[in-house]
Structure formats: C-alpha cells, structure tokens
Image (tube, rainbow, N blue to C red):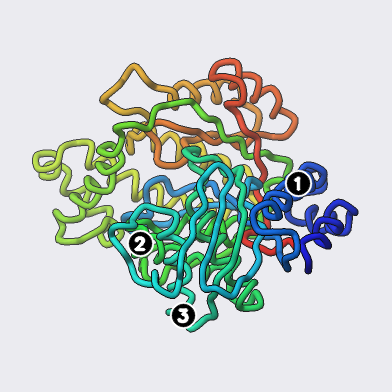
Amino acid sequence: MKLTDIKQALTGGALDARLAEVYGQEAVAAQKIRYAKAIDSFAALYGEDRDASLFSVSGRSELSGNHTDHNHGCVVAAAINLDIIAVASANNDGIIRVKSEGFSMDEVDITTYNTPDPDKFATSASIIAGMSAQFDTAGLCTGGFDAYTTSDVLKGSGISSSAAFEDMIGNILNYLYNDGKVDNVDIAKMSQKAENQFFGKPCGLMDQVACAHGGIVAIDFADPTAPVIRGVPFDITGAGYALCIVNTGGNHADLTDDYASIPAEMKAVAAYFGKKVLREVDESDVIAAIPALREKLGDRAILRALHFFAENKRVLAQTDALLSDDLDAFLSHVCASGQSSFCYLQNIYTTKAPDEQGLSLALCLAERVLSGKRAAWRVHGGGFAGTIQAFVPVEYVEEFRAAMDSALGAGACLPLHIRLIGACKIA
C-alpha cells in the first residue's frame, strides 16, 4: 500500500478497529496522531511515493522470577501497552536504514556485515546486522529496507527498550520478506542470538519473548537452549487492574558490581556442590550445608540461593493461580516475591550508598496506600535503583498515582495495561 493511502486510511478511520485491537479503544485517538507523525517523518526522510507498512512491538514487564533466569530458573513476564512503532518500506539495495527518533540514522549493508564484528559491539547497527544474519541462517528471506521508528518504551525503566528494538527488526523482516509466517517466539530467539553474538551481550531470553509474544508468558529456563514457553491467557486489565510502574529516580551509575554479585553468589553456592547453576542443586542439600557455606561464602550468598529456590516455586504457583483464575493467590505471591527480594535477594538498594533508598521508600509508600485494597507491589527488574511495580485496582489508581508523584516527582507513576498482542503489523 502506498504511504499516502496508509495515511488516508489512518486519518479516515479505516484502521481504528485494528488500533483498538492492539491498544484498546480509549487509546485510538492518541495512537492515530502518533502514527500520523511517524508517517510524516518517514516521508520526509525517504519520500512519499513508497509502498510501506506500519509495525508495532510492545515493551515488557517482569511479573515474577526476580533474578532467577541466569541460574536457569522460571519467570513470568508480560507485554505492556508501551511500544516501539515503525514505518518501513523494502528496498532493492541490500541496505537496512533505520532512523529512530532522537538518534542518528543507522545504515547497514547486510551483504557485507553478516558476521559478528567486535569493533561494532554495543551498537544498534550490530543488532540490525545480527537480526538479518539470523534470518539468513534460519533459511528465511532477508533484504534491505528503509524505516523510521519512534518509541515510548522508556530507556532505564526496566521495560526492555533494547529487546523491543531487536524484535522490531525481526518483525519488519518477517512481514516485508517472509509474508509474516515466522512465529513471534522464533523472532525472539533470533533476537537473543543477535544480542549475544553481534551486540556482545550475554543476555537471557525473557525480554525478547515477552515483547514479541504478547499477553502474559511463563518461561522455564531449565534448558536455556530450549526454554519451555507457554502463554497464560489471563486478562489482568479485564479483571479491573492497572499495572503501575513507579520510577524512583535512582542513579544506575556504578551498579555493575551490585548486579553481577547476584548471579555470581548464586553460582558460587552451586559450585560448592559441583554444579554450574542453582537449578541443578537440591534445596535440601543447601540447607544441610549452611554451616560450611557460611564459612566459605558468607551469609548473603546463602540467602540469595534460598531466594532462588523460593522464587522458582512462586513462579509456578503464580502461573497456576492465573490459569485457574485465582487472582487473590497471584497477588499474594507478588507481595511475597517483593518481600523475598528485599530481605533475602537484597537488591533494593546498594550498600555503596545506603542513604539512597528510593526503591525502599516507594515500596513503603505502596504498602501504606494499597494495604487492604486487594493490591500487590514488588521491585521491578534488576533492582538496586529504578522502578517498582504495583497491581492496582482501577478505582484506586489515581489515589496511588497522586501519592507516588507527590513523594517522587510528577510523572513518577506510570499506569500501564498488559497488552495481549505482541509483535505485529498494523497495516
């Protein structure tokens, strides 16, 4: 479809039903304005006389399984209604051009940049090349395209802007060159490989799957090369809840050691038993060996290991609760997950700066506001700084938002919805 025809369909209402399906009826008007601006930006860069398509990939939120995946544990995650959108058009020159709002344009010649290049690690160009290479390796079609993207998946908020971008490149290649036949989970797996091999980051698979799959998804990483992935058909929005992400304004600088210490200490406990990860260790053996482990590794490593075992069980219990429509059990486990993260995983603040405890403060405020209101709250993402999440009944969202914004700054609280559709073509 010509770009001008897409713009006319968008402004004339022909795409309203599709936008409502993806974003909800209440968001259609705002999304029409957003997509229209993206179309205009694409036209200014590449010209109006192009056949083009519109695409969307959601951000994600971890619902349970705090720091379990790196030790081959289980997680529950969900797509959210913040997303990256793209206007894209195939070309015949073997070059992928991507202009993301606020960033310089990437131009990647996929005919020559098709193997990992350490000099280009940690660049968006490496992701683009990596995704094309993964499609080629899988025997799928690939080719050049021109694209403009814009995103409201905020960086540093724990909702995976990088994974959404990776999935978006695969999403575009899927529809422009493969008739949309590639499964979204397969796109996610290729995204992980692209990030591992071309970007140079040994990430897991949770973020990519949650962004691409849509809805709530449970993932078991017992075998990280072949994780067990299943959708959980529970509509939290339909149950009358908003998923609120609260940005505490913490500083992420100099936290690398804090993040690295968690998998390192868990794996040190596993190594005591001759294993690589805690998933391979029996919890009862850790309990029996506590005296020796205290002497060899210290108390915190034991506490983090015990968090892992309990959190893994919670993920399974929460998945079962959602599958059986037991929302009260799910919410109870959310709070238990947060409590375990605070007390045993100990990723709520860094010991380097004990006076900076934004997450602790936000969790305390959430408890004060939401206790007795059939709600739940926990740390969100890696921890130490950043965000918490809360499941808030819609009738209390404004009260919760006002309390958080008053204490942490205007706009600190971001009420979201779980989005049922992941990576997709809009038109």
The numbered dot on residue 127 is none
Quick check: 178 above or below 165?
below
To which residue does mark 2 refer?
196
Q: Position of residue 396 (x, y in %)?
A: 70, 27
Q: What residue lies at 37% left-to-right and 47% top-to-bottom?
A: 67
**Quadrant showing the C terminus:** bottom right
Image marks 1 and 2: residues in contact by CB distance under 8 Å: no
CA gap between label 1 and label 3 equals 34 Å
Q: Which image quadrant for residue 4?
A: bottom right
Tag 1 secondary structure: helix
Within 10 Å of the Cα at label 3, are there few (<14), some (14-19), or many (20+) other Cα atoms?
Answer: few
Which label sits on residue 31?
A: 1
Q: CA distance from mark 1 to mark 2?
A: 33 Å
Front residue of this view, candidates 51 and 61: 51
Residue 62 at least partly seen? no
Q: Position of residue 357 (x, y in %)?
A: 39, 22
Q: Which residue sits at x=45%, y=32%?
A: 386
- What amino acid is at disc 3? Ala
Residue designated by label 3 = 138
Does label 3 or label 2 sit earlier along the sequence?
3
Q: Quadrant of residue 257?
A: top left
